[in-house]
Structures are given as C-alpha cells and as structure tokens.
Amino acid sequence: MKCLITGGAGFIGGYVTEYLLNEGHEVTILDNLSTGRASNLDHLKDHPKLTIRVGSITDPVLLSEVMAGQDEVYHLAAAVGVKLVAEDPVRTIETNIYPTELLLRLAVQGGQKFFLASTSEAYGKNEKDRWVEDDDLHFGPTSKPRWAYGCSKAIDEFLALAYHQKFGLPVVIGRFFNVVGPRQVGNYGMVIPRFVEAALQGTAPTVYDDGEQVRCFAHVSEVVKCVVGLMRQDNLEHRLFNIGSDAPISIRELAERVIALVDPSLKIQYVPYKDYYGHDFEDVRRRVPDTTRLYETLGFKPEMTLDEILKDTIESKKKELGR
Ligand code: UDP
C-alpha cells in the first residue's frame, strides 16, 4: 500500500511512519518541520520506501500533489501544544481547519481511507469522571484562547463525520489522551519530558497549581498500534474512538514518581498557572477516557504502566543528554 502521513516528522507521526514502513508499505510524509523535527526520522531517513516532503499543509497545490496515488491518509499535522496554541489562536484555526477540509475532499476524489488525529481537548472541561465518545463537549469562553485548540479539532471531527455520511468516505477519528514516550520534547508544554529533563539535570520538576489535576499517560508505541489497527477494520460500527490509557494519576504523584526514579533528593516546586501560561489560562482538572469502545473494536488497548513508560522515557532522555 501507499500511505501519506501529514505531520510525519512529529512525535507521534515518526512512530506511525516507522510502523507502516515495518509493515512494508510505501510512506510519504508531509511536514513543515515546525513542531515536528527531522531528528524524529533520523533512524528512517535512508529507508528506500520513505519519501519526505518538506512543506505546509496550508499549500493546496502541494496537498493535491502528495495525495495522488495514495491508499491511506493519516492526517496528524496540526498546531499542537497547549501553550503554543494558546499563544496563537489564528494560526491554530488556519492550520487545523482549512487543510483538513481540503484533504477530506481530495480523499473523496481519490478514494483514500482517512485517519484524523483529534484530541481529548475536544471534550473541553467536561466534569465527568470518565469521558465516553458521545459525551458533550464543554468548552470555556472564546475570550480564553486555550479552547481554540479543542474547538478547532471538534470542527475537524464534524467535517470528517460529514464526509463519511455524505460521501461514504471511510474515516476513523482518534481522540488522543496524553501520548508520551522517547523523542517527545518538553518545549510545547508536555509534562513528562519536562519533568524527566529537569530531574536528570538536577532541577526540581515544576508542578503548576496544586498538582491535583489528573491525567492518563499512554506509550506512543501502543497508541500507534491502535491507530493502524482501527484503519485496518473494514466494517466499523463507530468512527470516533478515545485512544489512550485509562489509568489516572495526579500531576503531583507523577512528579513524585519521576523524582523517585531519577533523584530522590529533589523537591517539587509549585508555581501558579499564571506564571507559565499567563493570566487568562484555564486548565482541565481531570481527563480520563473510557476506552471500552476501543477495546471492544480491537481486542486490545494501551496497557503499559506508568513506571514502564517513565523508565523508557528516562533511558532515552539520558542518551539524548549524552549520559
Ligand atoms: N504541567 C505541570 N508542569 C509542567 C508541565 C505541565 O504541572 O512543567 C501540568 C499542566 O498544567 C497540566 C498537566 O501537567 O495540568 C499536563 O500537561 P501537558 O501540557 O503535558 O498536557 P495537557 O494534558 O495539558 O494537554
């Protein structure tokens, strides 16, 4: 098969690329190397079945060119990272909405199967303990730029579902929940690489607010197996899936685990949200997926424990830092 991956040089994209190449497919990547890094593909760049196109998904001519002849599209390119996104909502909307619609249209014409990467941010700040795919989306006001990201991806989901209904386009939408693992960088928020990098450099992890906010962390390799697994199912009953771990942990406990594994002499630093994100920031206090639909469809779901994930991340960060 021939597969196109937009955002293929991103953290998750690099793993999707590797997975599809290992399955023997021809892979084309489109990436503008903004938040994606060429180094995510260093170990693959000479692969005979890989083509890397550096360019923007906002370029319509380039999009039709790279879509030609493909069998599957994995649309992962997006403006990502809560901080970056909150700082530039215009760029977020332009990058996350218009190109998705264009790609969907091209996929209807070209007959490609379509994976849309979406996000748990689409649930907003829904206060339920566990989020099921059909739950309501609870965004904050438009005066708080944070919600621009979740809203932009929710529009993408509406578009993808509409293209499925109207034109029969085979789409799969994955809502990712805090995906982590080797090669992820801390520049754009991303708590685990930030905590691990800090601890390895002898600095205390910085926990925002009281640290009682809750997340679930899934290893990228397991997430990618779910993504490709869903794309290979022929008669899907549903089109939208939570993809992630369903084992919750508070950010304070996460910091304690990192400290215990790297340097028990460190003490957590607590700082108010406004010192990092600015005044009009609003966090999501609890984010836990219900993964029943994913498990019932695939027969598997992300299961790696947080300690296994942290050990893997710590080992690879040590190598990056030359230890
Ligand atoms: N966080 C933190 N310290 C950091 C980075 C993040 O306390 O150095 C918190 C952040 O406020 C959020 C959680 O950790 O509550 C997860 O943040 P991340 O940016 O990784 O992902 P999010 O779940 O917010 O998309």
Image: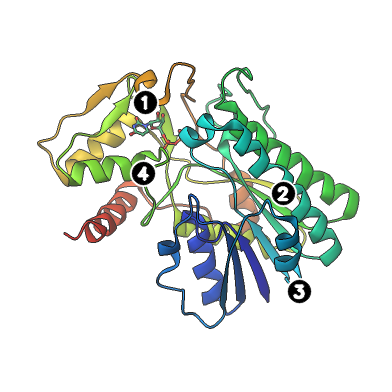
Point 9% across, 36% down: residue:
265
Of labels 4 and 2, earlier in sequence is 2
State yes or no: Cβ of the residue under disc 1 lies below 8 Å from any atom of ligand 1: yes
> With 174 as the anchor, is 270 left or right in this view?
left
Of labels 3 and 1, earlier in sequence is 3
The disc at residue 115 is none
Q: Is residue 273 above or below residue 264?
A: above
Q: CA distance from mark 3 to mark 4?
A: 36 Å
Secondary element at image label 4: loop
Q: Residue flagged by tag 4: what amino acid is it?
A: Gly
The disc at residue 69 is 3
Q: CA distance from mark 3 to mark 1?
A: 45 Å
Question: Residue at label 2?
Answer: 100
The extreme right residue here reads 166
Secondary element at image label 1: helix
Question: Residue at label 1?
Answer: 276
Q: Residue flagged by tag 3: what amino acid is it?
A: Gly
Q: CA distance from mark 2 to mark 3?
A: 18 Å
- The quarter holding residue 20 reads bottom right
Can residue 309 be seen at all in this image of the molecule? yes
Q: Are marks 2 and 1 in contact (CB under 8 Å)?
A: no
Q: Position of residue 197 (x, y in %)?
A: 25, 45
